[in-house]
Image (cartoon, helix red, strand yellow):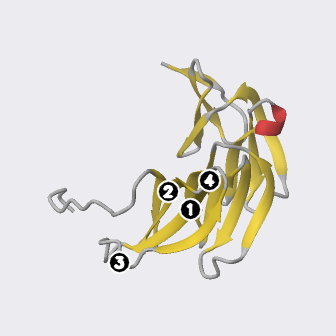
Amino acid sequence: MDGNEKLQLDSPNPLCFNIYNNKLYFLLAAVNNLDSLYTINVSNLDGTNRKELYRGYNLFNLGAYENSIYFVENHNLKKMDISSPSLIQSLPIKSNYYNIIQYSIYFSNNSDSYKLYKSDLGGLLISKICDDNAIIISVIDDWLYYYTGKHLYRIKQDGTGRQLVD
C-alpha cells in the first residue's frame, strides 16, 4: 500500500483497531450505553461486510494473538476465539493495559496498584515483573517498555535490567 487508496469506514467513534489474518477488528464507542466489537474483511472495507461479534460495557484495548482476540471490558481482560466468536473467556486479569508476545501477556495489574505483571495466555500462571506502575506497555525484542505516568522505562521480560529511557 502506498497510502493513496484511503477509505473511510462507515463507523463513527472507533475506540481502537487491530488487523489479524486479513480481518480488521475494531471497537466502536457506546450506542445505547453498549460498546461493540466488529470485524471486516480487509479485502472489502466499504463496510458492507461489517459483522458485530460482541457488545458490552466499557470495551477497551483490542489485541490479537494465536487465533484469539483479546479486549478489556470493565477492567477485565477477555479472550475471544476467532473461529467461534461466541466462545468468550474472562481471564483472571484486572487490567486496562496489556501487550501479548511469545505466548505471554504483559499487563498492568489493576488489583496491585497497576504494577507490571506477566501471565500465560490462559491467565493461570501470573507473576509480578516489577513494582513500577505501568500504564502503557510495548514489547520490542527481549525488552518491555512501559510508561509510569512520569517516565519511560525498559526492563527485560524476566524482570532484570530495569533502565530509565531518555
| Quarter of the image with the N terminus in it | bottom left
Q: Quick one: label 1 or label 3, which is nearer the N terminus?
A: 1
Q: Nearer the viewer, residue 166 or 84?
A: 84
Residue 36: which numbered mark, if any?
Answer: 1
| Label 4 element class | loop
Question: Residue 17: horizontal and vertical position, in percent?
Answer: 46, 56
Q: Is residue 27 above or below residue 149?
A: below
Say which residue label 4 marks: 33
The amino acid type found where label 4 is placed reads Asn
Say which residue label 2 marks: 28
Within-10-Å neighbours for mark 3: few <14, some 14–19, many 20+:
few
Farthest-out residue, left = 4
Residues at marks 4 and 1, CA–CA distance in whole angstroms: 10 Å
Residues at marks 1 and 2, CA–CA distance in whole angstroms: 5 Å
Residues at marks 3 and 4, CA–CA distance in whole angstroms: 24 Å
* Left/right of residue 94 with respect to residue 149 in the rendered view: right
Within-10-Å neighbours for mark 2: few <14, some 14–19, many 20+:
many
Say which residue label 3 marks: 48
Q: Nearer the viewer, mark 2 or mark 4?
A: 4
